[in-house]
Each structure stands twice: as structure tokens, then as C-alpha cells.
């Protein structure tokens, strides 16, 4: 390490040129000694000296090429760690220091990549239900081009969910949340974006969908939950209320607020229903 730092002033941006300089000086020491001896004794043969110099330069070039080739695996790993390449080619088990270092860095790169992927998933996925969380939903919306930011936004709330936790425990509450998320994801279209908004609230974006279609989709799921309930509270099937707002490219926060207001209307009108924003009519 000390030698590396001491020689860093020699071509600080190019390790290859620094190696060439050090190799050139080291391999020319015998030649310099011969030159000093020749001048001191007057017995310097210019032809032999020129031939020896040429051979030394060629040998230095070969040595530099070989060293550079031996360092190529480290360069490949460095690019992998910086995200410039997908995955380096594994080396055969030859057992030298380069192979050992290469294998260690390869493992470190794979662990780092896996950890980054896990962190990305954890940041955008709800661990209980397996669907997107609020951050993941908003990221999906942000990634949409402006021309595709139209359709309907729905905010959904499980009715009387607090009673599930109070009467049957938080374990049953978690099961109900997971079952409801699975029901939503299974019954809606593949192009629809479903996420857990927080607590017992969920959000759905219906791309290129009018309010009638969104109302019909959620009403169909509501009817199914009455016929095939995911659980019961005080002898009644667990239901949900929802508010729907038409979205035509306006700020997403505004649409969420409108859908939330429609959800409030659905609750005020008795729950277990779907209401449209700015309209008292329920589906």
C-alpha cells in the first residue's frame, strides 16, 4: 500500500502507464549499467547497445501487455460493482491471488446486487399483502407517460375493520387484509394497479376506464364478498366501501382527495357500496 501511494504521482489516472514506467525503469537498469561502464572504459559498442535497447523496450512492452491482461478481471469486476456490466465471467479455479481476489469481489458484487434488489422491493411492496404499498403505487403512476394518465382512481376501505382486530385479534385482522388484497388482485384486470394505501385502505387505478366500468368491477367484487366472504363480523360478511373519481391527467393528489371524499359519502350512506366523486348516485 505504501509503495502504491508513493508512486501515485506517476500517471495518477492510468495504472497501465504507471506500470509501464516502473517496468521500463526496472528492466533498463542493466542497460544503464552497461552504458555507464562502456563510457567509463571507452569500450561501448553502439550497434550492440542499440540492439540491446530495442530488445529491452520490446520486452518491457510484452511485460506491460501481460500485466494489463492479468489485471483485466479486476477491471471487469470494478465495472460490475459500478453497475456498468451485468455479470462478469467466472474464472477457472487456478488458485492464484488474482483468482482469489476475483472470486471474493464477485461474491461481494452478487451480495450487493441482491441486497439492493431486496431493498427496492421492500421499499415499494407491502410485506403483509404482497401488493404494492403507497410508495410503490405512486412510483408506478409517476412512470406512466402523460398520455396514459387517464381512467379512474378508487379508494377502498374495509368496513368495520377495527372490530375485526378488537373482537378477533390482530392475527385475524392481518389474515383479512391479505385475503382482501388477494381478492382484489385476482378479480381486477391485469392492467389495473392495486396497492395498499395504508391500514385497511386500498387504492386502485383503472387505466382507460370510465366510471361505469370501474363501478361495475368493484360492485361485482362486493357481491362476491357477500356470497363468498373472506370473514365475518358479528355474523355479517366482511364488506367494503369505495369511492371512485374520474382521472384525466390532473395531479394524482387531487384525484385521491376526490376519491376519498366519495368514499366518505359511501360510508355515510350505510357502507357496503361504491360511490362516485361529486355525485350522490351509488352503484
Image (spheres, grey):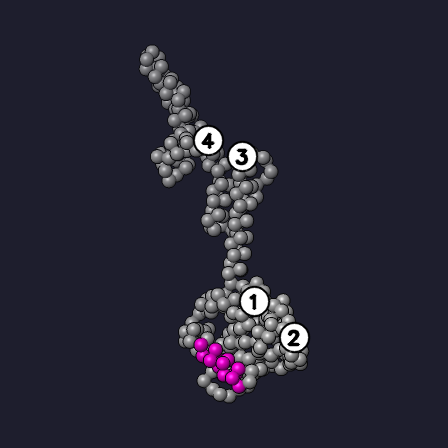
The image shows residue 232 at horizontal and vertical percentages of 65, 77
Q: Which residue is mark 3?
A: 97
Q: Which residues are magenta?
A: 257-269
Mark 2 neighbour class, 10 Å CA radius: few under 14, some 14 to 19, many 20 or more: some
Q: What residue sits 58% from the left and 82% below the top?
A: 272
Disc 2: which residue: 231
Q: Please name which of the two marks, 4 or 1, marks the residue nearer to the observer.
A: 1
Q: CA distance from mark 4 to mark 1?
A: 57 Å
Q: Is residue 151 visible?
A: no
- For the residue labelled by badge 1, is the local secondary structure a helix, a strand or a loop? loop
**Which residue does the numbered mark 4 point to in the structure image?**
63
Given residues 66 and 267, the one toward you in this image is 267
Upstream in sequence: badge 2 or badge 3: 3
Taking the spot 32% from the left edge, 13% from the top edge, the residue there is 40
Residue marked by disc 1: 131
Residue 118: quarter of image: bottom right
User: Splitting the image into 4 quarters, where does residue 30 fall?
Assistant: top left
Amino acid at each position: 500500500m505504501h509503495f502504491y501511494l508513493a508512486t501515485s504521482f506517476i500517471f495518477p489516472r492510468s495504472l497501465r502507464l504507471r506500470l509501464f514506467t516502473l517496468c521500463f525503469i526496472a528492466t533498463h537498469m542493466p542497460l544503464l549499467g552497461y552504458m555507464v561502464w562502456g563510457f567509463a572504459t571507452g569500450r561501448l559498442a553502439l550497434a550492440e547497445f542499440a540492439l540491446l535497447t530495442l530488445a529491452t523496450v520490446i520486452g518491457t512492452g510484452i511485460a506491460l501487455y501481460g500485466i494489463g491482461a492479468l489485471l483485466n478481471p479486476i477491471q471487469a469486476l470494478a465495472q460490475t460493482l459500478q453497475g456498468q456490466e451485468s455479470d462478469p465471467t467466472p474464472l477457472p479455479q487456478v488458485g492464484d491471488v488474482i483468482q482469489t481476489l476475483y472470486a471474493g469481489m464477485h461474491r461481494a458484487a452478487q451480495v450487493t446486487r441482491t441486497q439492493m434488489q431486496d431493498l427496492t422491493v421492500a421499499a415499494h411492496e407491502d410485506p403483509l399483502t404482497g401488493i404494492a404499498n403507497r410508495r410503490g403505487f405512486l412510483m408506478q403512476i409517476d412512470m406512466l407517460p402523460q398520455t396514459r394518465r387517464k381512467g379512474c382512481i378508487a379508494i377502498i376501505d374495509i368496513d368495520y375493520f377495527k372490530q375485526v382486530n378488537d373482537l378477533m385479534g390482530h392475527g385475524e385482522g392481518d389474515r383479512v387484509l391479505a385475503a382482501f388484497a388477494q381478492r382484489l388482485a385476482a378479480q381486477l384486470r391485469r392492467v389495473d394497479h392495486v396497492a395498499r394505501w395504508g391500514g385497511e385502505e386500498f387504492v386502485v387505478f383503472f387505466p382507460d376506464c370510465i366510471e361505469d366500468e370501474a363501478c361495475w368491477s368493484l360492485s361485482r367484487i362486493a357481491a362476491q364478498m357477500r356470497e363468498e366472504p373472506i370473514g365475518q363480523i358479528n355474523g355479517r360478511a366482511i364488506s367494503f366501501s369505495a369511492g371512485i373519481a374520474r382521472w384525466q391527467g390532473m395531479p394524482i393528489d387531487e384525484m385521491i382527495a376526490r376519491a376519498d371524499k366519495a368514499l366518505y359519502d359511501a360510508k355515510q350512506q350505510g357502507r357496503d357500496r361504491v360511490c362516485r366523486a361529486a355525485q350522490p348516485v351509488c352503484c
